[in-house]
Amino acid sequence: MKVLITGASGLVGTELQKSFSAKGYDMLLASRKEPTDDKHVKWSIEDGFADPEKLEGIDVIVHLAGENVSGLRWTDDKKKAIRDSRVLGTRNVVDAISKLKNKPKTFIASSAIGFYGERGE
């Protein structure tokens, strides 16, 4: 089975890589960095995939990428960045899938927006 993971360098993505590797899955990892081998593809939330044809043959997409929800105060700009990263990132993945000759059988998207206690917002 061949799996594409966006957000592969995050907390969940890193653990999924370990689990999928132990099961013998082939993985294609999407990130903002320039690819260093054929297991990586350049992708950004804003621009989508640099080489969408590399997605041909993918069986499963696990879409985890998005703005980090921890660490900074949730200003209006931060909230917009979180929301936009989920919407635009997912839209770009779906757009790439729609152009494939052989579409993946499974698409899993996961994102989080958490609220902890009364924030007065």
Image: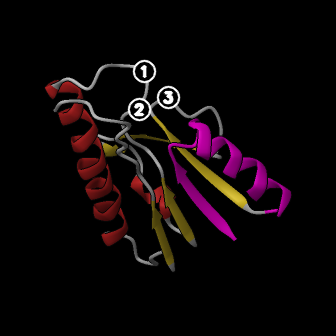
Residues shaded magenta: 1-24
User: Tags 2 and 1 in contact by the CB under 8 Å rule?
Assistant: yes
Q: What residue type is labelled 3?
A: Lys
Q: Residue tagged by mark 2? A: 68
Q: Does the magenta stretch include residue 99?
A: no
User: Tags 2 and 3 in contact by the CB under 8 Å rule?
Assistant: no
What kind of element bears circle 1? Answer: loop
Q: What residue type is labelled 1?
A: Gly
Q: Residue 33 carries which label?
A: 3
Q: Which residue is drawn at 45% across and 57% down?
A: 110
What kind of element bears circle 3? Answer: loop
Q: Residue at x 43, y 28 (%)?
A: 70
Give residue 65's position: percent from left, percent from top. Answer: 43, 44
Q: Quadrant of residue 114?
A: top left
In this rendering, the answer to whether 101 lies above or below 109 is below
Which mark's residue is nearer the viewer, 2 or 1? 1
Structural crowding at the residue carrying mark 2, measured as other residues with C-alpha within 10 Å and reported as few (<14), some (14–19) or many (≥20): some
